[in-house]
Image (spheres, rainbow, N blue to C red):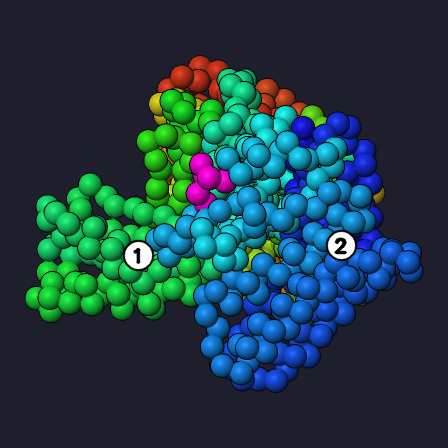
Amino acid sequence: MQVLKFGGTSVGSAENIQKVKEIVSSVQGQKVVVVSAVGGITDRLISMARTAESGDRTCFENLQSIIDDHFEIIDKLFQPIEKDEVIKLIEPDIEELKIIIKGVYLIRELSRKSFENLSGMGERLSSKIIARYIGANWFDSRHYIKTNYEFGRNQVLIDETQKLLSEVKLEMGNCSLFPGFISSNQKSENTTLGRGGSDYTAALLAAAFDADNLQIWTDVDGFMTADPRVISRAYCIDKLSYAEAMELSHFGAKVIYPPTIIPAFQNSIPIWIKNTFNPSAPGTLINNEKVDIKERQIKGISSIKEVSLLTLQGIGMVGVTGISMRMFTALAANDVNIILISQASSENSISVVIGGDQASIAREAIEYEFRREIAQNHISPVTIDDKMAVVAIVGENMKHTTGIAGQLFNSVGKNGVNIYAIAQGASELNISFVIKEKDIRKALNVIHEAFFLSDYSRLNLFLAGKGTVGSKLLHKVVSQARKLKEENNLMIRLVGVAGSRNMLLEREGLNAATVIEDLDKIGEACTIESFRDRIIEMNVANSVFVDCTASEEVASVYQSLLDANVSVVTANKIASSSSYAAYSKLKATAREKGVKFFFETNVGAGLPVIAPINDLVKSGDKIERLEAVLSGTLNFIVNTLSEENPLSEVIAEAKAKGFSEPDPRVDLSGTDVVRKLLILARESGYVLEQEDVEVEPFVPAEYLDLPSLDAFMDKVKDLNPVFENQRKKLASEGKRLRYAARLSEGKAKVGLIEVDSKHPFYDLEGSNNIILVWSENYNEHPLQVKGYGAGADVTAAGVFADIIKVANV
Ligand SMILES: NC(=O)c1ccc[n+]([C@@H]2O[C@H](COP(=O)([O-])OP(=O)(O)OC[C@H]3O[C@@H](n4cnc5c(N)ncnc54)[C@H](O)[C@@H]3O)[C@@H](O)[C@H]2O)c1
Ligand SMILES: N[C@@H](CCO)C(=O)O
């Protein structure tokens, strides 16, 4: 035998009831169907009852609309001759409903008895209509499910219910239908089973009839790995143990109501969660099969919002017995349901999570209970954190597996989500923790990824600067997307872009291929500060800010972004070559926050320079000397100068080729090389400031002081013969000009040098860079890195590599 339960949405309209009929007809063998009230009817009955109690005549309009809705369903489902018969079937219930409402309205009192009668009326109506429509024998659950009022609610009398149901089993044909939710007490007065009551009815029937399985037909495909409204990548879990399902449904996952599982669990009846609107989806199977150790450690994440964290604390609690008993008794006496409890071994405080709407009742109850201790300052007044959420990870395989909590809190922590309280039972089936409600999306995303519940991890990118390097980077984001997803399980999603005037932000992702045009068309005006504020406000997980500008203002927002747990990847050298204090604070913040601050392209563009130096330093080596050519632009200039190619034209060419800084005077003044040498020196362990670097500009200082770039480009023509003469002279001596950077004995210097053919810089072609590193280990023969030192493609590739490194794949 199979027991099939259909919830309110599944029977919410005539069309849906037709689907129910198809599902029931497709089931072979003996079947028992349980139905809820038509979707929304129970709430409407209750609200109507309250309206009647307050003496408001609109209760009668509400009543008529409830009746009309049922008649409309009958109208759609049945042929004219049958309709009258069905209406006759439900007439006595409708009459009873009218009488009770009239009574409540007249007496202005809604007694518990009337309430129970009214709230179960939806199932009485729906079950009769549906039984007739699907051709099932109708059985009145009130005759078989017996309750007793205890501890403020109706408790099912299991033995008596079992006995009555086993008797009725003998009378049942191939297809029977029972209304869910309704029951009666020993005086045969109508009662109901409370929240999730129809599921419970179905489980009781399945247990009493020893069914082969219990099918809960609802409007989702099954238990999802996380709330799909928050995590779009959440997917349906194929199998769960009873305990896992119980834990998941306790928090948030409203697929089934926990007590439902108990009768099925006790009788080892498998439960299927199936979707009425997608019946071919496999659904979730809940049973007591042994958990396969190869399965994922975490099956799902559940979450609950709109809760408050209430804390009682004070030194007067330490070592005093009965404090928790008094606190919990006070809460129970006021019908406050406790969702989570946390107490540290210091016994100095007890925190509980309760529904947000019960926070003030709970506070009053506890403060009253501890009024003496509070007056004597032994215990502090209760503190309440509102707008909180509880998140729980659930999985039987967590048992005795080390590192789960570490992985959980590490992933949440490095995304800047603060944890207010933690609870884990000794069963190790569930780790629950409390966070601010505003962080829930972020927390669920990172946990979903951390435990590989997602097929891939995701980086959320915010880009400032869409010029030479930035636009190439956007191409990379587009061209590499598929490969990264397939081979590295990494998805890079562009969620924000800012140019110098406009920005676009979209949590679900922008189109990297069109974003530059989109920015002009639909971008909103911005400053770098407003862009930063929006990034922080969006609070997305695994976010990376990428700076492809040469702007000081942009560099000045890194600190606040890192403080907000946003990683920073930058091609812009300004931050790392600003004051040593600011540079080291950025690095320290990234370390503290568990995020990344990467700037590999600051030196040597796409060449790996900073990483190898970092590795040497980490391995305990000491860097003693650096000699390098660090300017792609200046090397290109000295290599390209000729009679036909005078200085002024070669400068313009370096800019056109994307080698120079947006303002080439930054290169020609030596500033760009100073910045790079400073960064290399700092990364090598030296504490230096820009002023400590001795600098000889590539062109005389007076040329650099001109008010505009155009004026400079005009004036620099004067230097064409000077540079050409110098080149000729050097060529005749077998020498070449190089703009070199040197760090030795802690002293840094940049400037022009003449090199002969024996010098390692002599053959350095085009815009190439070379970096020679002498250390304790590399003393006779230096470590050497050589290759393209500038250019949009290589730089964008380097920035992209840094971005991927943030994801650690
Ligand atoms: N070109 C290279 O070979 C190379 C190599 C390594 C590093 N870099 C660095 O890359 C950075 C970008 O260089 P580029 O050649 O792409 O410069 P670019 O001038 O082509 O692009 C910079 C862009 O940043 C924009 N911008 C300026 N201020 C901004 C702000 N406040 N907010 C948002 N956008 C702003 C500009 O409008 C421009 O579009 C520079 O810091 C440069 O030093 C370049
Ligand atoms: N302007 C820089 C770009 C690379 O940092 C150069 O010419 O080297």
What's drawn in magenta, residue-wise? 156-162
Labelled pair 1, 2 in contact (Cβ < 8 Å): no
Side of 385 where 28 appears, left or right: right
Instruction: Name the image quarter holding the C terminus.
Output: top right
Extreme residue toward the top, this view: 780
**Mark 2 burial class by Cα count in 10 Å: few <14, some 14-19, many 20+:** many
Side of 367 where 610 appears, left or right: right
Badge 1 residue CB within 8 Å of ligand 1? no
Side of 7 where 773 appears, left or right: left
- For image coordinates 78% across by 34% down, the residue present is 280
Q: Magenta: predominant secondary structure element?
A: helix
Q: Position of residue 706 (x, y in %)?
A: 62, 65
Q: Which mark is residue 370?
A: none
Kind of element beneath mark 2 = helix
Viewer-nearest of discs 1 and 2: 2
- For image coordinates 82% across by 40% down, the residue present is 22
Type of the residue with mark 2:
Ile
Residue tagged 2: 129
Work out whether residue 685 or residue 77 is closer to the camera in this orientation and state it: 77
- For image coordinates 59% across by 20% down, the residue present is 758
Residue 378 visible in the current orientation: yes
Work out whether residue 112 or residue 681 is closer to the camera in this orientation and state it: 112
Instruction: Name the image quarter holding the N terminus.
Output: top right
**In this rendering, is residue 418 above or below 782?**
below
Work out whether residue 123 or residue 611 is closer to the camera in this orientation and state it: 123
Q: Position of residue 601 (x, y in %)?
A: 59, 39
Q: Which mark is residue 332?
A: 1
